[in-house]
């Protein structure tokens, strides 16, 4: 099962298209800078895309219109 749940995240982000764009940008930032919002042990996912989704779910990524 995918963690975090897409259904929970869609309560934060208004559309799947926008979610894909936000996750893509954040995961590229993580890959380039190696900077994450949480400690290494707090993540359940090992890959950048999963970590970006976790950050969005926890409200650590600010979404600007």
Image: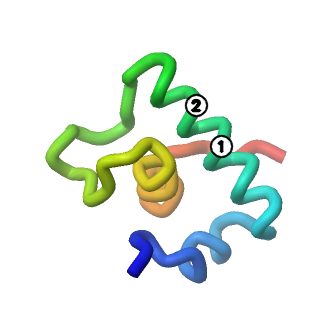
Residue 27, given in percent of the width and then of the height, sits at: 54, 38
Q: Residue at x 76, y 43 (%)?
A: 64
Q: CA distance from mark 2 to mark 1?
A: 6 Å
Q: Which residue is mark 1?
A: 24
Few, some or many residues within 10 Å of mark 1 (<14, 14–19, 20+): some
Few, some or many residues within 10 Å of mark 2 (<14, 14–19, 20+): some
Residue 42, given in percent of the width and then of the height, sits at: 21, 51
Q: Residue at x 59, y 82 (%)?
A: 7
In the rendered structure, are the residues bearing label 2 and label 1 in contact, judged by CB atoms less than 8 Å apart? yes
Looking at the rendering, in which quadrant would you find the N terminus? bottom left
Q: Which residue is mark 2?
A: 28
Q: Secondary structure at mark 1?
A: helix
Residue 63, given in percent of the width and then of the height, sits at: 69, 47
**Is residue 48 depicted above or below 54 in this figure?**
above
Residue 55, given in percent of the width and then of the height, sits at: 45, 51
Please tell me the numbered disc located at residue 62.
none
Residue sitting nearer the eye, 45 or 36: 45
**Is residue 19 depicted above or below 41 in this figure?**
below
In the picture provided, is 21 more to the left or to the right than 1?
right
Give the farthest residue toward the left: 41
**Is residue 4 depicted above or below 49 in this figure?**
below
Q: Secondary structure at mark 2?
A: helix
């Amino acid at each position: 099962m995918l963690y975090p749940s897409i259904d929970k995240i869609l309560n934060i982000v208004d559309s799947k298209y926008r979610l894909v764009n936000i996750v893509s940008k954040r995961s590229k930032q993580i890959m380039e800078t190696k900077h994450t919002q949480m400690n290494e042990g707090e993540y359940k996912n090992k890959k950048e895309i999963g970590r970006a989704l976790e950050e969005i779910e926890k409200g650590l990524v600010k979404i600007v219109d």
